[in-house]
């Protein structure tokens, strides 16, 4: 069933001067307009750049990396390696096919 409180709109275009529709309505309910939207772990922005998605991945993996860094003097290398491949690597590899060919300035 449609829930207007949980539904948002994002206008996606690579053109700079696109005439943007300012308001979408469904069943007389106005939808909230957003610049980017996260769906199934993938962040989509209105200009179709991958910058916001890469920033989200880096932030999530960075927090987990900080935890491993704090444990580096308390745990052995094998344990840290398992933690890395179990928690950090999947975050950085998720949907990498989509953002793999990004330009260097995003990194």
Image (cartoon, rainbow, N blue to C red):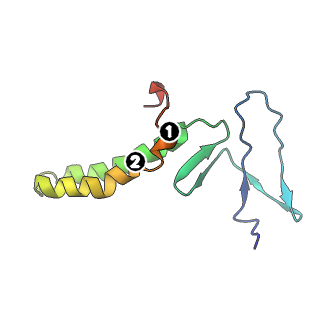
Given residues 1 and 20, the one toward you in this image is 1
Q: Which of marks 2 and 1 is nearer the N terminus?
A: 2
Q: Which residue is drawn at 32% across and 52% down?
A: 88
Q: Residue 93 carries which label?
A: 2
Position of 34 compared to 50: left or right?
Answer: right
Q: Nearer the viewer, residue 16 or 73?
A: 16
At 85% from the left and 57% from the top, the residue drawn is 25
Location of residue 17 by image quarter: top right
The local crowd at label 1, few if under 14, some if 14 to 19, many if 20 or more residues have their Cα within 10 Å, is some
Labels 2 and 1 touching (C-beta < 8 A): no
Q: Is mark 1 on a helix, strand or loop?
A: helix
Report which residue position mark 1 lands on. Answer: 99
- Tag 2 secondary structure: helix
Which x, y percent locates residue 4?
76, 65
In the shown orientation, is residue 6 left or right of residue 63? right
User: The N terminus appears in which quarter of the rendering?
Assistant: bottom right
Q: Quadrant of residue 26?
A: bottom right
Across and down, in percent, residue 102 comes to: 49, 31
Residue at 52% across, 42% down: 98
Question: Picture coordinates of residue 21 (x, y %)?
Answer: 84, 43
Q: In this view, does 102 lie above or below 77?
A: above
Image quadrant where one finds the C terminus: top left
How many neighbours does mark 2 have within 10 angstroms: few (below 14), some (14-19), or many (20 or more)? few
The image's mark for residue 37 is: none
């Amino acid at each position: 069933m449609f829930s207007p409180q949980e539904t948002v709109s994002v206008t996606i275009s690579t053109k700079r001067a696109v005439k943007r529709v300012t308001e979408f309505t469904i069943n007389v309910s106005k939808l909230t307009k957003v610049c980017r939207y996260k769906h199934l772990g993938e962040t989509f922005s209105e200009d179709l750049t991958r910058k916001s998605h890469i920033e989200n991945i880096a932030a999530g993996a960075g927090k987990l990396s900080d935890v491993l860094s704090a444990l580096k003097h308390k745990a052995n290398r094998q344990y840290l390696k398992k933690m890395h491949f179990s928690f950090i690597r999947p975050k950085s590899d998720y949907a990498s096919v989509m953002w793999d060919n990004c330009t260097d300035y995003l990194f």
